[in-house]
């Protein structure tokens, strides 16, 4: 019975790690006024009829702090790349010169920065919700095992262990948001 609980706890911690990884991915996509190839992560381009990640059809560089340069490996990919950027509704208009697609990152206004912070906090809350949902599942599982004969004192210890783990993950989320908020609000 203890093995079942340990296995469930390990699975739950894997879910917590995935929530943190997902939050890092989402925060990476939120631009902080500086050009970054990571802003285009997850952008899919129609490449010969199938959706393909942009970084698999083009070389993405940042020649300066305000510009992203997208050099497709095939010239006929310029149109689909441009279309994918428009459809992503990033608030950036791509410029196509026949060779390269350039994205000029405009300086962000105070209002836009506050909206970005709000978006980052929303992503953090989604991660917290996911972690709390898994906490609820594992706590219910332990309570069920206690009813089935697992020693109550060991069950309480496991619940306390899970709660401490959750608190550490919540602190990680808080730290990630603090760093991102500082990054966004820095002019």
Image (spheres, rainbow, N blue to C red):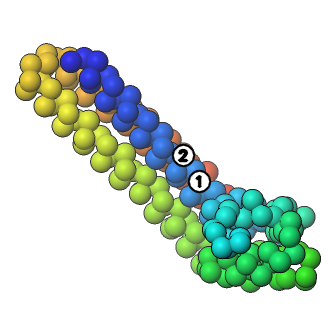
Q: Where does residue 149 sit, x and y in percent of width and height?
A: 9, 19
Residue under label 2 = 21
At a point 30% along the width and 48% down the height, the residue shown is 133
Q: Where does residue 65 sit, x and y in percent of width and height?
A: 84, 65
Q: Which mark is residue 117?
A: none
Number of marks present in the image shown: 2
Q: Work out whether residue 119 or residue 43 is closer to the camera in this orientation and state it.
A: 43
Asked if disc 1 and disc 2 are in contact, CB closer than 8 Å, the reply is: yes
Q: Where does residue 74 sit, x and y in percent of width and height?
A: 86, 70
Label 2 SS: helix
Q: Work out whether residue 171 or residue 45 is closer to the camera in this orientation and state it.
A: 45
Examine the image and state in which quarter residue 71 appears.
bottom right
At a point 73% along the width and 78% down the height, the residue shown is 80
Q: Is residue 132 left or right of residue 186?
A: left
Residue under label 1 = 25
Tell me if I can see residue 69 in this picture: no
Q: Work out whether residue 81 or residue 106 is closer to the camera in this orientation and state it.
A: 81
Tell me if I can see residue 117 in this picture: yes
Examine the image and state in which quarter residue 95 appears.
bottom right
Q: Is residue 140 left or right of residue 15?
A: left
């Amino acid at each position: 019975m203890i093995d079942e609980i340990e296995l469930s706890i390990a699975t739950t911690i894997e879910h917590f790690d995935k929530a943190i990884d997902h939050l890092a991915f989402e925060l990476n996509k939120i631009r902080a006024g500086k050009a970054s190839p990571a802003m285009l992560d997850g952008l899919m381009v129609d490449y010969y009829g199938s959706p393909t990640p942009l970084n698999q059809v083009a070389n993405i560089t940042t020649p300066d702090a305000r510009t992203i340069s997208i050099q497709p490996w095939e010239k006929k990919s310029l149109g689909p790349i441009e279309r994918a950027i428009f459809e992503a509704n990033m608030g950036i208009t791509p410029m196509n010169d026949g060779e390269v697609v350039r994205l000029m990152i405009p300086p962000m206004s105070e209002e836009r920065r506050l909206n970005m912070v709000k978006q980052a906090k929303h992503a953090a809350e989604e991660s917290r919700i996911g972690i709390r949902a898994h906490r609820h599942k594992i706590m219910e599982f332990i309570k069920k095992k206690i009813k089935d004969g697992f020693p109550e004192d060991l069950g309480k210890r496991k619940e306390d262990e899970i709660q401490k783990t959750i608190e550490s993950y919540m602190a990680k989320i808080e730290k990630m948001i603090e760093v991102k908020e500082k990054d966004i609000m820095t002019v």
